[in-house]
Image (cartoon, grey):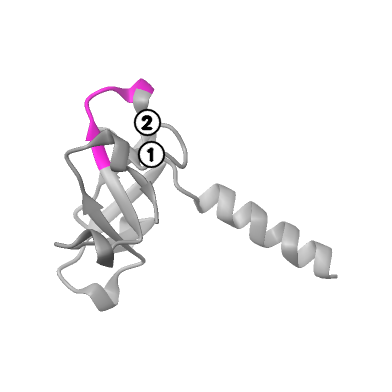
Amino acid sequence: MQKIIVLFMFTFFICSGYSQKVFKTSYKSDADKVIFVTQYKSEADMIVYETKYKSEAKPYSGIWFWTNYKSDADWKVYFTKYKSEADLKVYFTKYKSEAGMK
């Protein structure tokens, strides 16, 4: 039974994980993740670098490529003003080398 639970948790982590092709939605109900943007790196769960190149967006990298189509996205995100509503707190960086999970 424990193996099944561990396998389920691992699968959930991978599938909902940290895919990097991202679509910004206007509706919280459409989102896979509700995001709060922090002002400080120390508060973030993930440091994100925005790229212009789809090929740079790799899982677990923290490098996000913004897609114009919901169907192309690995994640549909909604940005909230309230930290308490967020599934994930992110900090946007100017440096690709800082990107990733904390």
Question: Which of the two residues, 19 or 26, is positioned nearer the viewer here?
Answer: 19
Residue ID for mark 2: 57
Residues marked 1 and 2 touching at CB (< 8 Å): yes
- The kind of residue on which mark 2 rests is Ala
Question: Where, quadrant-wise, is the C terminus in this rendering?
Answer: bottom left
Dot 1 corresponds to which residue? 20
The extreme bottom residue here reads: 84
Quadrant holding the N terminus: bottom right
Judge whether 38 appears above or below 56 on screen: below
The CA span between labels 1 and 2 is 5 Å
* Residue range (magenta): 49-55
Amino acid type at mark 1: Gln
Mark 2 residue crowding within 10 angstroms, few (<14) / some (14–19) / many (20+): many
Report the disc number at residue 84: none
Q: Is residue 16 visible?
A: yes
Q: Is residue 96 above or below residue 10?
A: above
Mark 1 residue crowding within 10 angstroms, few (<14) / some (14–19) / many (20+): many
- The earlier-in-sequence mark between 1 and 2 is 1
Disc 2 element? loop
In the image, 6: left or right of 81? right
Instruction: From the top left corner, tell me how far across and down residue 101 is, in percent.
Output: 41, 52
Give whichever of 41, 71 is nearer the camera. 41
* Image spot of residue 34 (x, y percent): 30, 62
Q: Position of residue 28 (x, y in %)?
A: 27, 63
Q: Identify the residue at image location x=22%, y=37%.
A: 95
Based on the picture, tell me whether residue 100 belongs to the magenta stretch: no
Residue 27, x across and y down, in percent: 23, 59
Q: Give the image quarter of residue 40.
A: bottom left
At a point 38% along the width and 39% down the height, the residue shown is 20
